[in-house]
Image (cartoon, rainbow, N blue to C red):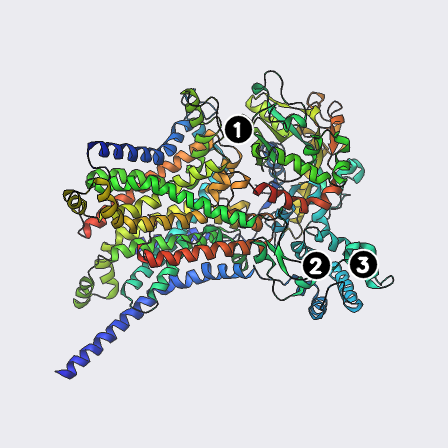
Amino acid sequence: MLGSGLLGRATLWAFALLVLLFLVLPILVIVPLSFSAGAFLHFPLPGLSLRWYARLLEHEPWRITLKNSLIVGAIATLLATLLGTLAAMGLARARFAGKGLLMALMLSPMIVPVIILATGAYFFYERLGLTSSLLGLAIAHTVLGAPFVLVTVSATLGALDPTLVRAAHGLGAPPWLAFRKVTLPIIAPGVVSGALFAFVTSFDEVVVALFLTGPAQRTLPRQMFDGIREEINPEILAAATVLVALAVLLLVVAELLRRRSARLRGIAP
Amino acid sequence: MRSTGTLAAAFAAALLTAALPAAARDLTITSWGGAYQNAQRELYFAPFQKETGIKLVEDTWDGGIGVLRTKAQGTPVWDVVQVETDELVLGCEEGILEPLDWQALGGKDKFLPAAVHECGVGAIVWATILAYDGNKFPTGGPASWADFFDTRKFPGKRALRKGPRQALEFATMAQGVPPAEVYEALRAPGGIDKAFAKLDSIKKDLIFWEAGAQPPQLLASGEVAMTSAYNGRITAANRQDKRNFKIAWNAGFVYQIDSWVILKNSPKKAEAFELVRYLTRPENQAKLPAIIPYGPTRVDAGELVPAEFAADIPSSPQNLPHGVFFDASFWVENVEKLTERFNAWAAQK
Amino acid sequence: MATSAVELRRALRRAERRSTLGGLALALPLTAFLVVFFLLPILGMLAKAVENSELAIAMPRSTEALRAWQGLGPPPEPVVAIVAAELKEAHARRQSAMVAQRLNREEAGWRNLILSTARRLPDGPQGSWLETLVAIDPAWGEPAIWAGLRRAARPWTDIFLLAAIDLHRDDHDAIVRVPPDQAIYLDVLLRTFWISALVTLFCLILGYPLAYLLATLPERWANPLLILVLLPFWTSLLVRTAAWIVLLQREGVINDLLVRLGLLAEPVALVFNRTGVLVAMTHVLMPFMVLPLYSVMRGIPLSLTRAALSLGATPFLAFRKVYLPLSMPGVAAGCLLVFILALGYYITPALVGGAADQMISYFVAFFTLQTANWGMAAALATLLLVATLLLYVVYARLVGIDRLRLG
């Protein structure tokens, strides 16, 4: 058996820890570099300073692109959460022949390479007047984010006992009330973690942004992309560190939600 | 509950207004990024906005007639663009560029002859040169393009601009052809094949850059031992980041003129033209070399450049004899075929 | 009694139908949204792979004449006359560039031929129209350009799809291989599959033991470690790519360390080449391997392997005969997912790879954004999409759509 016996177990632990280091270390290594007092990406650091963070605040492009990214992210998250939640509830109660196919279509944006959506949107959104606008980008990001919501909400719905809803109906609650008082509290963790996924997807997306946006709609990832391509300096790493902090925050929230939802569904712990 | 709903609706409405395509967009200017565009922003773009009240949005690009073609589709998102000569000639011929009003620019005789075109006005005189980090070669760096292609004498990776332009010229110079005869050699039967063969000889040690800001970065990070580069970026890195980069002017270089053009069907034509006129004022052109050593295209601006900065400019008397002027007619005729060939060659292992 | 049973069954069926209809109504908005903003754009893009309308728009009479003409060019004088006259008209309408662009797809260099001819065409023929054309450029006397024009006159074209697999049509319209110095796309396609396969393999080798350890740990230990697996997943792709460049640069952290430890005499090239692409992609895609493996392994009761061990099986045999087969669904799910996602990668190879490490997505972007060669972009995108969808079907059959989650 893999890792049976003390020696085997120790080897397994050592290997797994190395793999975990491989996963985490590259992300953590940029954090100290962003606090460097010098301009070069070397250890040991010549000294610590916040100068690169000050640059982030001063430089106009960071502010503008952050604002654009937040607008796009907010719209995409709202739309994806709304559409994804509705669809998850619908698919949970519908029984019909083509259901698997419909599900496959709805989840396909997770699988189909982004470049395909980006190229298609590049040609097609123009006809709808959606190129060079944040709305067009937000719509494309909704396409990418909605499947995540669908998946997370479907998972929580699987735990919803339909007799509860029926009981609410039986007690005279109109559908909206039954939804708010029974269904929503149970699926809420799924909805919120789906929304988090959708937001992260949009906030990190660069391929569609490269295709759809003009100079006035640059987003944060585009700004990062150009920066990485031309010159990786501590300023870029400062921006990256802020993004890592955000990722940690969102990850913790998502993880807490997952546990809460698991508890509600009666799965240990 | 009511107030939450109202708040949510207001939030959604605010988001949508922020995201909807603006009815009228701002004037855009597209240049070559990095230290060069930083200089342009400080010297031209910011003062222009202050002086005229016209809001300006910047973009960057790395050249290529194909990019210009995609940007000219429908209502363009770009207005004023700085282009290389072959892009200027091809774009004008294809009708994707706006003809300029030369009277308003001060008359054709005010400019170097090569800076005058139906659809474009010269922006700068610049060069692609051989650069290296002086600190890495204490006993003397590469002095010729033959050295650049000699990985035994000077080990290490090299970088070239992605694409055939200037690369074929340098590969030809590396075969011992003097700069002045480079285009003759390339036009001779087999000349292009010989240049490609030369490039192929160091392929495993070559990496390619696209943006002008990359070569100084590649030198600074030690990723390459030497690289081709736009001359101004190297001097700017020395001045601003206290680098000790060297330009091997004597190795031979290709110098050329970039032009300002306005895309056809630009919805901001009048403002775009006003900007081009501002950019080509003699006193404005003369300011550039102090920050980044690119030469002016106006005869009357050349006289205004302080002598101390002239030595770093490609057209200075000690540099000019080693340079060859970019042969626009050769490239107009061949750029697409050779770009395709170059890309195929680069993509093959 | 019997009637009421039938009635009940009927009422049940009615209720179910009502519930299904209500459910469909709820699923409709997302379905419609995806059809309009996802499906239609993709179908429209695919159509561009065979679209051939430039000549028909700019030179309709020539298109008709060329369609009627058979044989190896140059065609008879009446056809040549129509083409010449109409090219001149198109030039006056500023549509000659469109024709030139289309012909340039047949052979690089024909843009010049068309544009310079259009510029220099006289109002009337000097001698025959063919002689006039040949006087402007001898290429008009060759069959090649006429065969090209005829191909451009067809209602649709296969040149882009053929070019995407390194084929083209010769003057006789036969399908032949392109010259070796232009043949790159089969290579790119193979490279895309090869890089994806290697990345999948690396993810499996690194991910399997990790997932196994996590699955056999008590939950209060496994959960925090699992968060470490999830962290890269939630971190921006660009941040991770930037991090790898910082680490792998010639004077980067890893080279620094190895040289200082005396393991390397001098720094080696780890980035802007294949090594960089493989390392960075393995890192980026690893969570997609570990998570499906972990969720399958969690469901494997340890008692089974313990039983095998107590029956005298060696640890290796117990693993091979009992645990490995039980974990295969996770292996299949993880490998398929990583492979499918890897196929479409663009950003990471573009930033950490060299020119010879770019995958198919890079070329789709290149043709769309940098050369306006949309036929070629669409043809390559079609290949990528078909490969992805085939694997998606395999995934659906083998693993199940309902198990598809990326987080």
Residues at discs 1 and 2 both on one chain: no
Asked whether residue C308 appears in the rendered view, the answer is yes
Q: Earlier in the sequence, mark 2 or mark 3?
A: 2
The structure residue drawn at horizontal position 49% and vertical position 59%, both measured from the top left corner, is C42
| Circle nearer the viewer, 2 or 3 | 3
| Image quadrant assignment for residue B126 | top right
Classed neighbour count for the residue bearing mark 1: other residues with Cα under 10 Å, few (<14), some (14–19), many (≥20)? many
**Residue C152 x, y percent position in the rendering:** 66, 62
Residue sitting nearer the eye, B278 or C178: C178
In the visual, does B267 lie left or right of A206?
A: right
Task: Determine whether the residue tagged by mark 1 lies in a helix, strand or loop.
Answer: loop
Res. B223 mark: 1
Q: Which residue is disc 2 drawn over?
A: C95
Q: For mark 3, name the chain.
A: C
Q: Which residue is disc 3 drawn over?
A: C133
**Residue B21 x, y percent position in the rendering:** 51, 53
**Residue B48 x, y percent position in the rendering:** 63, 37
Res. C293 mark: none
**Residue B285 x, y percent position in the rendering:** 69, 32
In the visual, does C313 lie left or right of A203?
A: left
Task: Determine whether the residue tagged by mark 3 lies in a helix, strand or loop.
Answer: helix
Tell which residue pokes out farthest to the right in this image.
Answer: C127
In the visual, does C153 lie left or right of A56?
A: right
Label 1 and label 3: CA atoms lie apart by: 53 Å
Q: Amino acid at mark 2?
A: Gln
Q: For mark 1, name the chain.
A: B
Q: Amino acid at mark 1?
A: Glu
Residues at discs 2 and 3 both on one chain: yes
Label 1 and label 2: CA atoms lie apart by: 47 Å
Which of the image's four quarters has the N terminus of chain C? Answer: bottom left
